[in-house]
Amino acid sequence: MDRTAEKSRSVEAGVGPEGASSPEPGRAEIVAARYFNNLVLSPLYRRYVQEMQLRGDERVLDFGSGAGAAARHLAPLLAAGGGHLTCMDVSARWQETLCGVLRAYPDVDLRRGDVRSMGLPDASFDVVLVHWMLHDVPPWDRAPIVAELVRLLRPGGRLFSHEPTNPRHGMPAAEVRTLLSGAGLREGVAEEGKKAILGPYYRAVWFKPG
């Protein structure tokens, strides 16, 4: 697939407030992300995706997909099982990078912009992944964005949350819990811990009643 075709895969919607506070990454940041997240941390992301225990036939939204650290493991699983992967990000440069990472999976749906402007119907997804990105959303935008993600999740569906809790760059686990429970989700298995490379974190699977 040539670069023109790769770029055309991304569907763009209104960027809105979320995108206004999300500057495009520089070349050095993209190179670092592809090396660190997609190579050095690849075993951690592979294990995380395996622990999601997907059948492979689900409709999955990777929200804030970045350079594809999780998507590169989700894509082959869903392609083999008849599922479908949607990767969403506000950044044009991250989406362009992701096109290259996922070039072998042309059926992956790439969407750029504010999730609230996508016009997607209720219950569009069986699974929503919010991995290491909610802390980067401005505090005043977090509740509306979480509410939209919950709207897009089908009743009985699961939302996987994984956030850093470092005070210097992260958000408290209590705030994540307040946001997700306030949007109507129920917390399932949860874990708070610390990894040598990533630092302190909170991760959990949340369920939408129904």
Image (cartoon, rainbow, N blue to C red):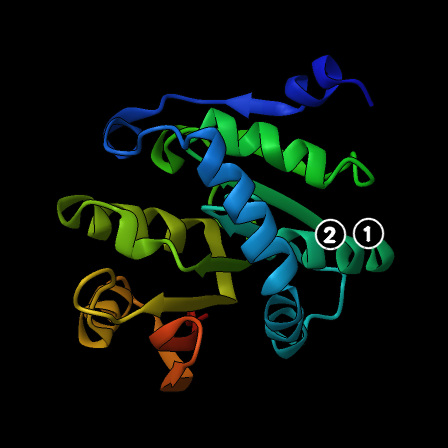
Amino acid on which disc 1 is placed: Ala
The answer to whether the residues at label 1 and label 2 have Cβ atoms under 8 Å apart is yes
User: Dot 1 lies on which element?
Assistant: helix
Badge 2 marks a residue whose secondary structure is helix
Which residue corresponds to mark 1? 79
- Report whether 145 appears left or right of 188: left
138, 35: nearer the viewer:
35
User: Which residue is at 60% across, 51% downward?
Assistant: 35
> Residue 5, percent across and down?
74, 17
Figure quadrant of the N terminus: top right
> What residue lies at 73% left-to-right and 52% top-to-bottom?
75
**Of all residues shown, which one is farthest toward the left?**
140
- Check residue 104 in the rendering and tell me which mark sits there, or answer none: none
Residue at image position (51%, 38%) is 30
Any mark on residue 75, and which?
2
> Is residue 78 depicted above or below 31 in this figure?
below
Residue at point 59%, 46% (across, down): 34
Q: Position of residue 205 (x, y in %)?
A: 45, 76
Q: Nearer the viewer, residue 38 or 148?
A: 38
Residue 101: percent from the left, percent from the top?
70, 40
Residue occupying the far right of the picture:
80
Distance Cα–Cα, label 1 vs label 2: 6 Å
Up the image or down, 7 lies above or below 123; here it is above
User: Label 1 neighbourhood size at 10 Å, few (<14), some (14-19), many (20+)?
Assistant: some
Residue type at mark 2: give it: Ala
Residue 194 placement, left or right of 46: left
Quarter of the rendering containing residue 77: bottom right
For this view, does 68 lie left or right of residue 193? Answer: right
Q: Is residue 153 left or right of residue 9?
A: left
